[in-house]
Image (cartoon, rainbow, N blue to C red):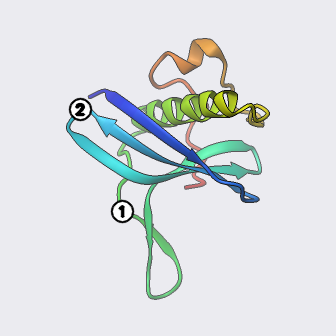
Amino acid sequence: MDITEVRVFPVNEDKLKAYATITFDNCFVVRDLKVIQGNNGLFVAMPSKKRKDGTFKDTAHPLNTSTRKMIEAKVLAEYRKELERTGAPPPEVGDRELNKEQENSPGSTEDDSGES
């Protein structure tokens, strides 16, 4: 399974930095991923729905760490490219590594922070 398209929509909020849409194998779309500025840098939160008790539950999420890493690497790389296109300063990635080599390889960010 490959991510064949990533679209990022930056927003000007405190912790929420962007929304993202990803497409798998040109045939399955997941919308409303979020790029969040967390305590340890940027991370990608999966789409979620608010429950009656006020908590949030992911509506779609990867079942393993390698898939989460692949999604996060692709989304954060596209977020960085979008900032470069608009002339905005590069993102603060905290202790997460996000360099050009990692942006081009699937499954290449720090491990799952559990912040989604």
**At 43% from the left edge and 31% from the top edge, which residue is drawn?**
66
Q: In x, y percent, where is residue 32?
A: 45, 56
The residue closer to the viewer here, 111 or 29, is 29
Q: State the residue position of label 2.
A: 26
Q: Amino acid at mark 2?
A: Asn
Question: How many other residues sit within 10 Å of disc 2, few (<14), some (14-19) or many (≥20)?
Answer: few
Q: Quadrant of the C terminus?
A: bottom right
Q: Residue furthest front?
A: 86
Please identify the quarter of the rendering in which residue 96 is found.
top right
Q: Residues within 10 Å of mark 1 (few under 14, many from 20)?
A: few
Q: Secondary structure at mark 2?
A: loop
The residue that disc 1 covers is: 59
Mark 1 falls on what kind of element? loop
Mark 1: amino acid: Thr
Which residue is more in the foreground, 89 or 65? 89
93 relative to 108 in the view: left or right: right
Q: Measuring from the top left, give residue 25's x and y in whole percent.
A: 24, 30
Q: Nearer the viewer, mark 2 or mark 1?
A: 2
